[in-house]
Image (spheres, rainbow, N blue to C red):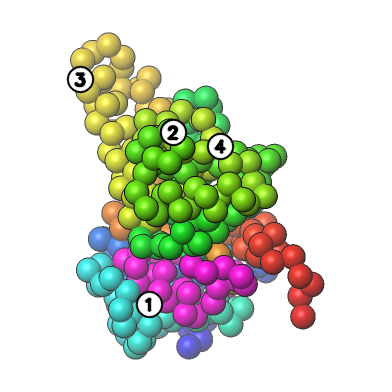
Amino acid sequence: MRPDRTAPDGAAPDGGDGAGSPPVVVDAMGGDHGPAEIVPGAVTAVREHGVPVILAGHAGVVREELARLGAARLIDVAHAPDAVPMSDRGAGAIAGGSSLVVGLDLVRRGSGCAFVSAGPTGATVSCAASLLGAAPPVLRPALAVALPTVTGGATVLVDAGATVDPSPDVLAQFALLGTSYAEIVLGVSGPSVGLLSIGAERGKGNRLARRAAALLSGLPIAFHGNVEGDEVLAGVVDVIVTDGFTGNVVLKSVEGCARAVLRLVAASGAVSPEALAPVGRRYDAETHGGAALLGLAGTVLVAHGSSRAATVARACVAARDLARGRVAARIRDRLDPRPAR
């Protein structure tokens, strides 16, 4: 399906170099708030950051939001008659004309450089894997999030929710994906890798963790060993590997705990809310926009379902930067260094 073309109503005020480059395709119908937040976020991405965007969604609804924002001629719309509900776990999401399918198909055909969605994670992952395909020899995709640490750097958490029941082989491959992401995106040389478990000692953990640890020990990576939950933000390692179920719980726990602690400190009067704001921003989803879906043949960024306009705008910027840096292709080349046919 081709987007309905309209002429832009002006260049981005910051002089961004988005003109002439493939646009970021945004799922306008995804998320808890739908077009009411997604469309303003996309408009902000274009106007303030110079990121070209196509919105995939119900044309009538999306154009109404664009008109309300005075941006009717700013962004192209790819009509999608259906939307995948947030309750969808992924089964059957590939069928029909949903905004997920329409948007990802634009990326598959080269009409977009990346895809952004705040829709249901399971459905987004399923559709992306089906339409874009895995990058050989990837077994299952994984979501990577760079968590700020107390040392001032960041630790890549992988998987943050894409594959909730991985095998030990898949978990071991997550380590390779996370290592590549840390090297390429964060610029870490020889990143160390830790396996999230219930004890730092060798042999601790459930069957999955124990079997994965044995595999990680044999990979060409700097395997640190097990790390515990209280070390996630300590900067002990550069990459933390876990299954998607645990990783998603960890991610949301970190974000929730950061908000709670900052509120408690502010309420105590010990530090002003203004002084705490920079710390809060480090752990706010708005700062990073979302999680990169690694292991696919294209660039996909999954945003929080609760994303507001500012987070969506940041996700568009992050997706543009990932695509511009050819991160997906470079990770593929690291995992499968054979010459392309």
Q: Nearer the viewer, mark 3 or mark 4?
A: 4
Name the N-terminal-most of marks 2 and 1.
1
Residue 166, how many percent across, how many down?
A: 41, 62
How packed is label 1: few (under 14 Cα within 10 Å), some, or many (20 or more)?
A: many
> Going by the picture, which residue comes out furthest to the right?
339
What residue range appears in magenta? 112-140
Please give the residue where the numbered disc 3 appears in the rendered image. Answer: 267
Q: Residue 39: say if magenta.
A: no
Please give the residue where the numbered disc 1 appears in the rendered image. Answer: 99
Q: Give me the C-alpha separation between circle 2 and circle 3.
A: 39 Å
Q: Give me the C-alpha separation between circle 4 and circle 1.
A: 42 Å
Q: Report the amino acid beneath label 3.
A: Ala
Q: Nearer the viewer, mark 2 or mark 1?
A: 2
Secondary structure state at the residue bearing disc 1: helix
Residue 205, how many percent across, how many down?
A: 37, 44
Q: Which residue is pictured at 27% across the width and 11% down the height? A: 270
Q: Report the amino acid beneath label 2.
A: Glu
